[in-house]
Image (cartoon, rainbow, N blue to C red):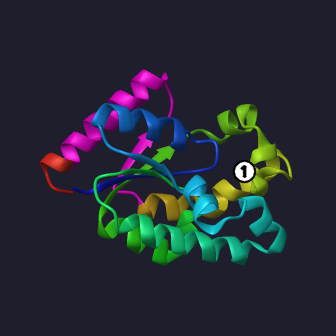
């Protein structure tokens, strides 16, 4: 059974929707960032204090391991698409959904203290979006616009997943 993989900007709703999909589909949920910290025995902040490369290396190890599992819902970190190997690993056994949330909404309600790449303020969010937008879209099997209530967006996701499974995307 394929994994359901959620990608998108920090603050786009990956973890929230991942947990909801897990309940609806009766599948285990894994937040890749939490899994990385547990697996590596370090916080993401400590990796970034060393270098972004140190974090991306750990992220790649984590993604490779998670991609080998079956039938789970995975919420990835926002920068997972920065490395082609991550996308290739996730695609090998997963259906990749991009949660595309308006950047203005992210800027207005994301708590940046828990997101190392966003600590530099709102402009950083816009810069990251411009930098990653094409990679997100190119990596996704399905694009879901996060513009509505949790229930409305979750309904769209479930419908898209069922269609994809039906047609073996």
* Picture quarter with the N terminus: bottom left
* Picture quarter with the C terminus: bottom left
- Residue 52, quarter of the rendered image: bottom right
Q: Residue at 42% across / 22% down in the picture?
A: 151
Relative to 151, is 156 above or below?
A: below
Residue 158 lies in magenta, yes or no? yes
- Please state the horizontal and vertical placement of residue 57, each as a whole percent of the image: 62, 77
Name the residue tied to disc 1: 126
Camera-side residue: 136 or 83?
83
- Residue 49, quarter of the rendered image: bottom right
Total numbered labels placed on residues in the image: 1
- Residue 46, quarter of the rendered image: bottom right
**Residue 58 horizontal side relative to residue 154, left or right:** right
**Residue 91 horizontal side relative to residue 126, left or right:** left
Q: Residue at 65% across / 63% down in the picture?
A: 131
- Please state the horizontal and vertical placement of residue 81, each as a whole percent of the image: 53, 66
Q: Residue at 83% across / 51% down in the picture?
A: 119
For residue 107, say whether it is visible.
yes
Secondary structure category for the residue under label 1: helix
Camera-side residue: 31 or 7?
31
Specify start and end residues of the magenta stretch as a single range: 140-164
Residue 155 lies in magenta, yes or no? yes
- Please state the horizontal and vertical placement of residue 107, each as a whole percent of the image: 73, 38
Q: Residues within 10 Å of mark 1 (few under 14, many from 20)?
A: some
For residue 77, say whether it is visible.
no
Q: Residue at 58% across / 69% down in the picture?
A: 59
Q: In terms of secondary structure, what is the magenta stretch mainly? A: helix
- Please state the horizontal and vertical placement of residue 158, each as a whole percent of the image: 30, 35
């Amino acid at each position: 059974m394929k994994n359901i993989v959620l990608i998108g900007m920090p603050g786009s709703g990956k973890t929230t929707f991942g947990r909801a999909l897990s309940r609806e589909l009766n599948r285990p949920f894994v937040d890749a960032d939490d899994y990385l910290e547990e697996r590596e025995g370090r916080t993401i902040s400590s990796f970034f204090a060393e270098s972004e490369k140190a974090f991306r290396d750990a992220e790649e190890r984590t993604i490779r391991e998670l991609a080998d599992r079956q039938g789970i819902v995975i919420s990835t970190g926002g920068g997972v698409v920065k490395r082609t190997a991550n996308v290739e690993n996730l695609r090998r056994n997963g259906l990749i959904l991009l949660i595309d949330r308006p950047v203005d909404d992210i800027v207005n309600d994301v708590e940046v203290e828990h997101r190392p790449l966003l600590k530099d303020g709102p402009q950083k969010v816009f810069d990251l979006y411009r930098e990653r937008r094409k990679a997100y879209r190119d990596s996704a099997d399905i694009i879901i616009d996060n513009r509505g209530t949790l229930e409305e967006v979750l309904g769209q996701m479930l419908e898209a997943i069922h269609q994809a499974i039906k047609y073996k995307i």
